[in-house]
Amino acid sequence: MLITAECQSIREDGGMSIPRRHSDPARVAAGERTFFITASTWGKRGLLQSSRAAEPFIRTIYDYRGQGKYRLHEFVVMPDHFHVLITLGVDMTVEQAVQLMKGGFSFRAGKELGLKAPFWQRGFSEIRVFDSDAFENQSQYIRNNPVEAHLVRTVEEYPYSSAQRSDLNPMPERLKPVFLEDLYSV
């Protein structure tokens, strides 16, 4: 049996082999992706509890959104962490987006507030959002986080959240459910 280097689909022992990959894995990118992201302050200290720090952080996430780095659906800035719900395009990784938020704020805090000590805990957590139910669940979690933490009684009372903002990006169309009757309606 002749087996070429280009197509090794059958091994000599009759088993299947893994075909060679011809594309550069570094250049393979997924399409648009939506993530729920959480990152914490250094040592979980309450570094974001005042408007002096929370408002510049909010400006930072809006600045990068304005530059087209991601679409911003929801956010909350808690005293010792933040949550965001964002959608990334093919040219941005979740790691890059978080680095922009955390690094951009650290730079701004150093420049505007004179903060020099480490601000962020290393790393972050992310949950990939695949459908409208997950999107709504994560949105509700973000909006209710200050109430659940007993910082306020209602979501409207918390000033460092997207709960009462109208300038957010809507849910991506690809997450919205498609109903069969919509597909076949004439």
Image (cartoon, rainbow, N blue to C red):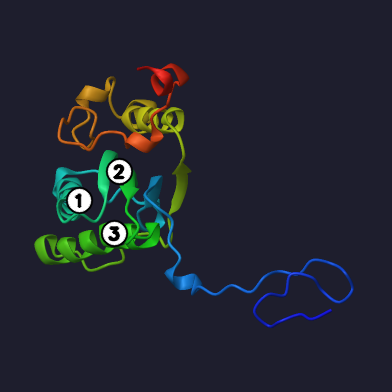
Q: Are marks 3 and 1 in contact (CB under 8 Å)?
A: no
Question: In front here: 37 or 52?
Answer: 37
**Quadrant hosting residue 6:** bottom right
Residue type pointed to by label 3 = Lys
115 sits to left or right of 185: left
Residue type pointed to by label 2 = Pro
Foreground label between 2 and 1? 1
Q: CA distance from mark 3 to mark 2?
A: 15 Å
Residue type pointed to by label 1 = Arg
Question: In front here: 21 or 151?
Answer: 21
Q: CA distance from mark 2 to mark 1?
A: 22 Å
Point 37% across, 58% down: residue: 42
- Of pointers 3 and 1, the one earlier in the residue sequence: 1
Q: Secondary structure at mark 3?
A: helix
Q: Position of residue 85 (x, y in %)?
A: 34, 41
Which mark, by number, is residue 102?
A: 3
Point 35% across, 31% down: residue: 139
Crowding around mark 1 (Cα neighbors within 10 Å: few <14, some 14 to 19, many 20+) is some
Residue at the right extreme? 13
